[in-house]
Amino acid sequence: MNTEENPIQEEKIDLKNLLFRYYNHWYYFLVSIILFILIAFAYNRYTTPTYSVSSTLLIRDDNNTQLGAENILEGMELFSGKTNINNEIVLLKSFSLLNQVVNDLALGVSYYQHGFLQSNELFQNTPFIVKVDSNHYQITNNEFRVKVIDKKSFNLTCSIDDKYAYNLQTDRLNKNMSANIEIDEEFLFNEEIKTEFFSFKINKTKSFNIEDILENNKELSFKLHQRAKIVGSFIEGVSINPINKETSVLKLKIVGENPGKNIDFLNKLTEKYISNGLNDKNNMAINTIDFIDKQLSIIKDSLILIENNIEQFKRSNPNIENIEEEYGAFFQKQKIDNSIAEQSVNIKYYRSLLNYISENTDPNSIVSPSSIGITNPELNTLISQLLQLLAKKRDLELTTTKKNPNYISLLSQISHNKETTIENLKNLIETTKIYENDLIRRQSDFTKSINTLPSNQKEYIILKRQYLYNEQTSVYLQNKKYEASLAKAGTESDHKVIDYARLDSELPVSPKTTVTYFFCLILGILLPVLFISLKEFFNNTIRSKKDLLIHSKIPILGLIGHSDKLTSLIVPKNSKSVISESFRSLRTNIQYLAVDKTKKIITVSSSIGGEGKTFCSMNLASIFALSGHKTVLIGADLRKPKLELEFKSESKSGLSNYLIHKSTLKEIINKTEIEHLDIIFSGPTPPNPAELLDSSKMKDLIKELNKKYDYVIIDTPPIGLVTDGVILMKNADINLYVVRHNYTKYQALSVVNSLYNNKQVENLQIIINDYKNDMGNYGYGYGYGYGYGYGYGGGYGYYEDDKKS
């Protein structure tokens, strides 16, 4: 059970430790949160808000086709056709349709009013408008600043750097004309402003208010746009989707900074869409009527001519009145002539259509086959497909180049459709001619019978037949014209607007004040967490007991807190401080080490300088002396001695003098102000400290001192830099290794770990020094003491505050 519970307990301690680590950097969080709240405030205050505008449109699809006049009349069904909702979405977002909307609303020029930190686009209520010369080059995407001087004049400023001239007619940039000019001049309203690169006039509108402009010192500007780019921006900006799968109702939505402009845009878009649909339907009827009118004009002339000939014949032959009754059978055969007339009209139509397809003339001039009585399903389908392909071609020509694969593929489809349609028309013409020739042959038989009649009767019958033939043709065409006119008059739109464009909400889509503050608050918390985590991730110093346990198996003997005092000798001067109590705890723990020795030799070492080795040595020696134990402190760090800084002595002799036989033991032992504590200073720095410390005289010195003193404490050189300290540690009963909190790097533990693992020294223990009491208990997270877990906490009132001592 214990083995299962311990990991859980350890994990809880780690989590708490982690939270305390973040808490210790509370000022990071405070600064970060304040900073991000200020950023959120500035973003909400100075970001131009965007609003959502939408409208709904009912689309007639294949499942909800209405019965209009164009569908009731025979032959008029092609005027309406059927629609597919997905195709209509593509049409609504087509370049050609949106280009019409942009032109109608004059969106090729944008107007702005500038504030201190914010600029707003003006629409409809602009104090002036720009009249662009479409036959002249222009500069696009460049700001022109307008400073109104009075009712008649203004100052125009602009800076144009490496801008290509733009051709409005072709919607292309002329890369051979690059503008680099600066303008800062006064002009009059309605005056032509013309250079090599642009030409326009600025005219006042009804919204022009000179008092308001001058009083508020309004800064105005305008910018011209390339047609392809402004239309492309609306294609990207408008979203069109069915409300749900069950209906054919589309929702048109656009998000932008100027809701008034977007409302007008969506309303104009639906208006043009419905208008274009009606025009497409009416164009077919109009083309049919025009074709019939041309044929009627020809027939009318023929009828007038034949009527005149008949009247003249009757005057010349007054006895011819009863010929119609006598030869009524011949006139009953006039139906053959009527059929010939119909076939003649059909052949003319086929040839007209063949001429259109062959010569690639205006597609709007095409006439529906069914509208003139030709009910050929294959031809109707081919013509409908051709019209759709040509419409796609017009859209692609506005948005892409001729090398585009989609454009090339579309041309191939159009070519294939035309080839099929031409072949179909040729076959129809041949078939119709065969039928027409058969009718003519039958007509010829009647003609032969007529030829047997007297010449005056024969001539009259021929004239009468010609008149009836043209008259029947005229009646037939008049009926078709009436049907087409009725269909045109009764044409209704397939689609209608359900809801005109309006704001979806008075609240802006962005910035959302609450959401902005929330996310900035989250970022204000996450950024310090990320910073602290990365800082600790790349921090390779010893920060906790866990770090020591990971990188070393050496037991932890004790922990010394952080001291803010200028002096390193804390114990004699502040005997009731927390640090003094730490050394008392350390003294107690040392008594459990080398218990077989009544007198003990203790070395204090570290990896590098600055870890508190000398600090621990002198205070440990002091705590033993204060407890009545006779103690000697040896400054064995011959390379960089520091004991002289804390203990004053007039003697300049030290350990190095003794080891080279220039001083006696009595001469180098110095009394201190602390009872029972003697000290041997390092003395002058020798050229060969390692050899001196490894000499037999040094070993004899330690043995002699061990007989005389209860505790011999040796402040050794750092073992991570030189081998001097290791030499002394092998002669000691207890070896204390100082690790400084948040200072000692765990890589520096490699030397002492090797000594411990290879058992080269005895009773090797770690002392954690300079531990900063950030968590309310300086022992938290370490649990020091012999056998672990033993230690004293701070803040119990038993100890004196270090700052007060």
Image (cartoon, helix red, strand yellow):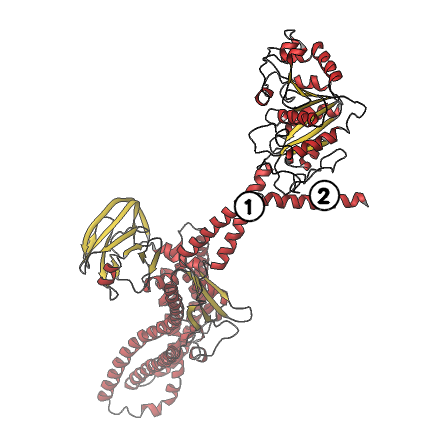
Q: Which residue: 62% across, 46% down? A: 19
Which quadrant, please, contains the C terminus?
A: top right
Asked if one can make out residue 487 in the rendered structure from this viewpoint, the answer is: yes
Q: Nearer the viewer, residue 313 or 506?
A: 506
54 left or right of 222? Answer: right
802 left or right of 548? Answer: left
Quadrant in the rendering for residue 550: top right
Q: Which residue: 40% across, 75% down? A: 372
- Compared to 388, does 468 lie above or below? below
Q: Which residue: 54% across, 52% down? A: 522
Q: Which mark is residue 26?
A: 1
The answer to which of marks 1 and 2 sits earlier in the sequence is: 2
- Compared to 711, does 127 lie above or below? below
Badge 2 amino acid: Glu
Q: Secondary structure at mark 2?
A: helix
Q: Position of residue 804 (x, y in %)?
A: 57, 37
Q: Within 10 Å of the Cα at label 2, are there few (<14), some (14-19), or many (20+) other Cα atoms?
A: few
Q: Secondary structure at mark 1?
A: helix
Q: Within 10 Å of the Cα at label 1, are there few (<14), some (14-19), or many (20+) other Cα atoms?
A: few
Q: Nearer the viewer, residue 201 or 542?
A: 542
Q: Position of residue 317 (x, y in %)?
A: 24, 89
Count of number-bearing discs: 2
Q: Nearer the viewer, residue 795 or 751?
A: 795
Q: Which mark is residue 10?
A: 2
Q: Nearer the viewer, residue 569 or 504?
A: 569
Asked if one can make out residue 397 in the rendered structure from this viewpoint, the answer is: no
Q: Position of residue 300 (x, y in %)?
A: 28, 79
Quadrant in the rendering for residue 776: top right
Q: Position of residue 556 (x, y in %)?
A: 71, 32
Quadrant in the rendering for residue 768: top right
